[in-house]
Amino acid sequence: MAKVYYNMIIIDEKRIFETIIKRKPRSVALNGPEALFPKIQNTVDSITEKFDIPAYLIGDACWGSCDLNTHAADILGAEILFNIGHTVAMETFGEKVVMINAYDDTSFDIVARKCAFGLKGQNYKSISLLTDSQHLHQIGCVKTIFEEYGYDVIIGRGKGQLNDAQIFGCEFYPAYDVQKQVDAYVFLGQSRFHCVSVALSTGRPTYMLDPYFREYSSIDEYAQDLKKKSILSIYNALDAERIGVIIGLKEGQFAQIRALELKKSFEQLGKKTQLIALTDITNDRLQNFKGIDAFIQVACPRISTDNHFEKPILSVPQALALIKLLKKEPLDDFLKIHHWL
């Protein structure tokens, strides 16, 4: 497993303090990725010492802006929920949630130069730079390095929650929208999770820059393995007589209308369906449901591609591909779309 360097992360505590001074809450809550918990613990201590108010660290897993867990903040009576480390184009969600940046100050200079030189043998003329929340501020510096080596560097425009050059694991407009202009993608950061979506949605060569080990690597073989796994799950679900349609209960993953649409589509094709609502979709949880041959979940597409399940569990793109197969239509490139939601 890749190593994560907690000490390189800098949380924007200044904005947290300014927000508390302005709004004067009686209590606050903080959450974020589990990897940032040690840093968030320090921030919780700083808030308590500085303002003498309860500051709660919500210890449940938080996978992104789709998983804010405002319900936990409501139960705690926290008037503000600071979500750490999921930088998006919006600074707030409603009145309660304030998005707080957490930047990684690790330099990409060495690995960027190594990659720019190494890819010369591939005869790439144009590349696009992409990254996640923690490294957005370093796009400009890496762009300059690749331009020094003669590359035409394309920065994809953001859309919705996404900033320019930013991608999620399930949504990647800045990559998808420029695919006809570039020969390859270069992702800043130590995350195969993000790189896979770029490789599969565009079909272009994709490389990952690891600033900690100062190495770059191709993600394409790993991405193809996940694609094969996704296709196999579709075919394994082809003969399913009864399908469980799972609605995610996390606020950013709640897609009830999509679930009902899929339920209707499969019933029209002669399948029996059952609606299931779950907060955490795991193999252990699914073992509780008997008489179901396959599942479809509309919460998060990466649940289906990145995790092990004993029975087929399909994401929305996989479910739509299964419908095509049942109608005797070609499968096509079902993952080559700008998001998998």
Image (cartoon, rainbow, N blue to C red):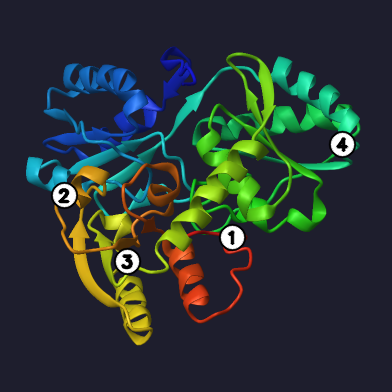
Decide: few, some or many residues near mark 1? Use Cα within 10 Å; few <14, some 14-19, many ≥20.
some
Task: Name which residue type carries label 4.
Answer: Tyr
**Residue 151: mark in rendering:** 4
Name the residue rendered at 63%, 68% in the picture.
332
Q: Is residue 108 above or below residue 88?
A: above
The residue tagged 3 is: 255
Q: Is residue 163 visible?
A: no
Q: Earlier in the sequence, mark 1 or mark 3?
A: 3
Callouts 4 and 1 close, C-beta under 8 Å: no
Which of the 4 image quarters holds residue 319?
A: bottom left
Q: Earlier in the sequence, mark 4 or mark 3?
A: 4
**What is the x, y in percent for residue 82?**
29, 38
In the picture as drawn, the residue positioned furthest to the front comes out as 239
Callouts 2 and 3 close, C-beta under 8 Å: no
Name the residue rendered at 68%, 50% in the picture.
156
Task: Name which residue type carries label 3.
Answer: Ala
The answer to which of 54 and 163 lies nearer the viewer is: 163
Q: Is residue 293 above or below residue 224?
A: below
Whole-number angstrom distance, CA of label 4 to CA of label 2: 47 Å
Q: Earlier in the sequence, mark 2 or mark 3?
A: 2
Left or right: 233, with 296 as reference point: right
Whole-number angstrom distance, CA of label 1 to CA of label 3: 18 Å
Whole-number angstrom distance, CA of label 4 to CA of label 3: 41 Å
Task: Name which residue type carries label 1.
Answer: His
For the residues carrying marks 4 and 1, which lies nearer the camera in this image? Answer: 1
Q: Earlier in the sequence, mark 2 or mark 1?
A: 2
Whole-number angstrom distance, CA of label 2 to CA of label 1: 30 Å
The residue tagged 2 is: 71
**Residue 338: mark in rendering:** 1
Left or right: 178, with 289 as reference point: right
The secondary element bearing badge 3 is classed as loop
